[in-house]
Image (spheres, coloured by chain):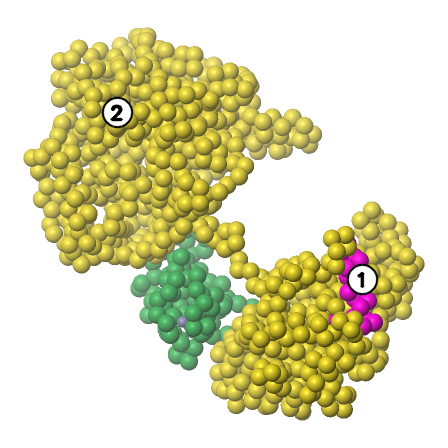
Chain colours: A yellow, B green
Amino acid sequence: MKSINLKENQFIQFHQKISFKFDGVKYFGYKGDTIASALLRNNINLVGRSFKYHRPRGIYTCGIEEPNALVQIISEYSEPNTRATIKKIYEGMEIESQNRWPSLENDFGSINNLFSPIFTAGFYYKTFMGPHKKFWKNLYEPLIRRAAGLGKPPKDFKGISNHIHHNVDVTIIGGGLNGLLAAKSFINSNYDVLLIDFEEQLGGIINNSNKISLIDNKEPKDWLKETIQEIEDSKNIKILKNTLVTTYNYINHLIAIEDRFVGSKPIEGKVNSTLHKIRTGHTILCNGHIERFLSFQNNDLPGIMLSSSFEKYMCRYGLAPSKEPVIFSNNSNSNSLVYSLIKAGLKPKAYIDSRSGEEIEPNLFDLIRKNDVPLYTNSQIKGAFGNKKIEKILVEDSSGALNEIKCDCLCLSGGINPDVHLFTQSKGLLDWDEKDLTYKPSKPFQPTITLGSASGQFNFDNLNSDINEKLKTFKVKKLDVKLELNTNTKYNIEKLWEVSPQKKSLWAKSFIDLQNDVTTKDIRQAITEGFDRIEHLKRYTTNSMGTDQGKISSINALGIVSDLLDKRVNEVGTTIYRPPYAPLSFSAIAGRNCYEFYDPERKSPIHSWHLKNGAIFEDVGQWKRPWYFQINKDESMHDAVQRESKNVRENAGILDGSTLGKIEIKGEDALEFMNLIYTNSFTKMKQGSARYALMLGEDGMVKDDGIICKISDQHFIATTTTGGAATVLGCMEEYAQTEWPNLKVYMNSITEQYATFNISGPNTREIMKKAFPNINFSNEEFPFMTFQFHEFNGVPIRILRASFTGELGYEIYIPSNSAPKIWDNIQSLGKEFGLAPYGTEAMHLLRAEKGYIIVGQDTDGSITPIDLGLSWMIGKSKKDFLGKRSLTRSDTIREDRKQLVGIIPSNKVDKLEEGQHIILDKEIKSPVPMLGHITSCYYSSTLGHDFALAVIKNGHSMIGTKAYASTSSMSTTGVDIVKPVFYDEDNKRLVS
Amino acid sequence: MLIINCPYCGPRDQSEFSNGGEAHVKRPDGSKEIGDSEWGEYVFIRANPKGLFYERWVHTHGCRKWFNCVRDTSTDEILVTYKLDEKKPNLNNFKSVVKTPSGEPEVGSGNFTVEK
Ligand SMILES: [Zn+2]
């Protein structure tokens, strides 16, 4: 195909040359060019290889509907599957063709074309159930992986997108003639209006074709300029250009993507696309129509193009892809291409129409005759032929004779379809138009209005009355626009979906879906095999399942199917058009909610101290918690954890417990409320005392635990697990509002207001005395599970005597701002008593030695307090609390429930692991009845061996017996089932 | 995405709210004897109709208040929201405004593009 540049064009700056690389070779285009127009200018017709058969493919269209010309943009993080027909070039752009190896010209995968008889409809499904499993694994899968596919995924992605929300009365989608006229009606009205167009310039058909000659007696481009100016000047209308509406959701919620770097390279670190989330009262769809192609042998050859696309290249890009294309049509839409060619001083090599001479519009007839264009009426193209590009076509004329025509370009028109994607996404219903042979919007489901060709009005004669009628519910100006056309015709089409091939061969291909390499033969075969429902047929053949969603071909497929089944097209129906209208990148959807903004990071007030003191952190919910502290770079995690835990047992340790959830509960009825929320009874509890408490779900399963401090019957402070804080507060609020609104009670999170230090170990009392000299820490004055309020250097603090390690321990609650100073003070005072910080891992080890559970680790939402051996925590005399009734359900009183036990290896040197199954037999012979599994497991230097907590069937009655733990290497380790407490069983150290 | 009219704050984006399942499910009175089936019904069984549904929502990232609504589960449209202590509206009031794509069956997805 030899292209020529046309004279001056308003959209292309011919004085501004731009260089870019395609497959490593440098070319020039002009400012305003798309990749496709620039390649055509350089006479490059072969731009990619097809998905399945690796057939050579070129540029088929001039817009978003492009099935073939998909390229990889190397200079933009190697973005794959970019439509060459819409992406604008910029200086230094690097582009690569896709799906070819080693090169586009010599592609090894094109051998698939020879094998094509085996890649027929349902190929994927048939191979999955091939003759032998090995067939798939060794032959088909490697073959398909190697051969199939589009671009390569980008290695690295740094694109940034943001989200903008809009709330408007009216959204007009499409800034073509009808969109502009609709917007014009709304100028200076009381409606907030958004006008969205996918292109850089508004105007649509006015820019893309020579169909219209005068608007209100003005040159179309002058009228356009004036109208756009009026719309821009109107304060109530906002215009979004370069913005594609991809999604039309329920309740008039639209999603649109705006390209912020059209025609220039995205700047790293700058927002390169914006996702618009639009809430609108009414949506006016003016998104026009899409031309469809026709099926005949080799209708995929480079050099074949849709006729309106050819015209768009001429009008919009100042480029005729060929000097003398052949035109093949079955309808009147290609008339204007003939007009445009002749206007530009070119002419078609031949005009072939399947319609009879009487049906062809008289003015087209005149134009063709006057310019001596060879005319074939009642004729069809039987096939296109050539090596990597079209070289000749075979035409069967009205007499049945075959004519060979040499050509370098063929323009096709199979008719036009309203672009109904968004309309059907909105759940509007379509109806088949027997005269215009296409689906048209019929019943909107939402407040949706369709105008112009998007509504199926392919003529311009009712332009004013149609818009005025459909906009009459709005208080807007009436339109009276005068339009004159160059090709003054009514839309006329004759049914033609597929031309029967001239000779039948296994290798002859007449495509129905170019991107997915689906042939009309595949459609026939699928129907023969029984896949005659349109949704089944689509999956079986993969027809219209590519990134283009069959925009130029899916209606043709329906036509072929309806003929084969001898059903009306309405009975066949269409497949569902699903969002997005065109591919939407994940980064656009993610917006700024990625990297550091994906989830907030929460840090304790002591965080900077931890950083300076060798803390290795672990994530607990959103919190960063010190996992363990490294005293030097060589210390392993195991060594650090053993050192830290040993120090707590022998001297004293300090843990930053600030992340624990803290909830303050106040109100006249606080006591009654707490009795209803937790299993424990707080009624007889003394003021100033604390209690370990459990919270259940209504199903009786343990949901959270914590320590409840009773300040008075009207005032409590509860702690929760670090991860459960929000859930527990949410649960309290829910029940306070929904079940017991009569109770006067209020609750609030105070987690971030207070830091918490947990100090424990035999030397703790000495350290506390030194740190807080005015407080008496004796057992008599400050017994276990009590708390006191004090003031320390003007800071109000609360000290609770409690322990999660089994040692003598205190928890200090300090307003967050004052916490770092007091932490530093305790560190320096504690040195002489061997005080050292410890992390969450040592804390887990220490609590497990005492058999204290961690909700969510030793429980999993299927464990009751009874299963844990914590029946003593249930306030049995209470009439009600969350989940109480469930503790006597048939399921929760079952004897063989999984219950918490301790596990130690029978041979002390053996190792155990979390997640190991506990079984009864030494030998593993499937099926193996499983008793349960290990939930927590550690090595204890205090005990000198591994130990574990586990939940196993009937566990409480198995204490004292032996069992086995299965290993990942299919062997077993002998274990003893013991009570779930390994250290200081009678709590002497706790109350010392 | 929906716009939900919080009875306390006014219309807000759905992302501020959390769904709380079926509304008007009475928690059995704990001070009385509760049978297994009555309790099981309360804990485990919820309706899941296609069409009008009384539902609970909470304005999690707002006023944190719970409230009730009537939602059409086939279109996701929330027809009315009301406070917990308000009487539940009669569903017959909404029968005329319930819209589903024409020809949609009582049960099923209703994924049609052409009128049946
Ligand atoms: Zn609210």
Residue A55 in the image: x percent, y percent? 47, 20
* Tag 2: amino acid: Phe
Residue A294 in the image: x percent, y percent? 34, 24
Residue A726 in the image: x percent, y percent? 55, 69
* Tag 1: amino acid: Gln
- Residue located at (82% from left, 67% from top): A646
- Residue located at (68% from left, 77% from top): A811
Discs 1, 2: same chain: yes
Establish if A431 lies above or below A114. Answer: below
Chain letter belonging to callout 2: A
Chain letter belonging to callout 1: A
Instruction: Sort mark 2 into few (<14), some (14-19) or many (20+) by Cα contacts within 10 Å.
Output: some
- Asked if residue A219 lies left or right of residue A518, the reply is left
Residue assigned mark 2: A14
Does residue A917 show up?
no
- Mark before the other along the chain sequence, 1 or 2: 2
Q: Secondary structure at mark 2?
A: strand
Query: Where are the magenta residues, as a range?
Result: A636-653
Q: Secondary structure at mark 1?
A: helix
- Residue located at (40% from left, 68% from top): B70
Q: Nearer the viewer, residue A200 or A277?
A: A200
- Name the quadrant of the N terminus of chain A: top left
Residue assigned mark 1: A642
